[in-house]
Image (cartoon, grey):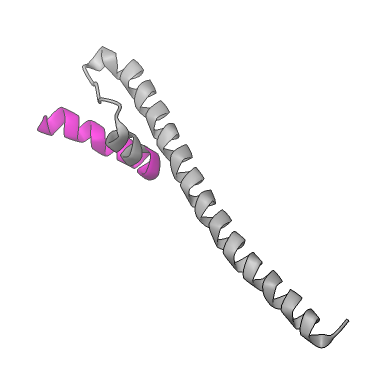
Amino acid sequence: MEPIWVVGIILVTIFLLLVFGSTLKSLKLVGQGIIKILIGAFLLFFLNALGSNFGIHIPINFITAAISGFLGIPGLAALTVVQVWII
C-alpha cells in the first residue's frame, strides 16, 4: 500500500471521529437535560400530591419542571417558597 493511501485513510478516520464524536456528545447532553426535566416533573407531582393537605400547589410546566429538575430539592424548595410567600 502506498504511503499516500495510508495517510489519506488516517486523515479520513480522524475527520469521521471528530464529526461523529462531537455529535454524540451533544446528543448525550440533550438526553441528560430531558431526563432531568422529567425527574423535575415527577418531583413536582409528588410535592403537589403531598402538599395538597397544606394548600401547596405548584403548576407542572416546562419552566417549573426545569427548575426543580436541574436544581433538585433546593429548586423545589425555592418554588414552594415563591408560591407560599409571594403568590
Q: Is residue 81 magenta?
A: yes
Q: Nearer the viewer, residue 40 or 5?
A: 5
69 w.r.t. 6: above or below: above
Q: Position of residue 85 (x, y in %)?
A: 13, 32
Q: Position of residue 67 (x, y in %)?
A: 31, 40
Q: Position of residue 37 (x, y in %)?
A: 40, 37
Quadrant for the C terminus in the image: top left
4 w.r.t. 77: above or below: below
* Horizontal side, residue 78 vs residue 36: left or right: left
* Horizontal side, residue 87 vs residue 37: left or right: left
Q: Is residue 71 magenta?
A: yes
The residue lying at 25 percent from left, 25 percent from top is 58
Range of magenta residues: 69-87
Q: Nearer the viewer, residue 40 or 20?
A: 20
37 w.r.t. 47: above or below: below
Q: Position of residue 11 (x, y in %)?
A: 68, 77
The residue lying at 81 percent from left, 87 percent from top is 3
Quadrant for the N terminus in the image: bottom right
The residue lying at 18 percent from left, 35 percent from top is 82
The residue lying at 30 percent from left, 26 percent from top is 60
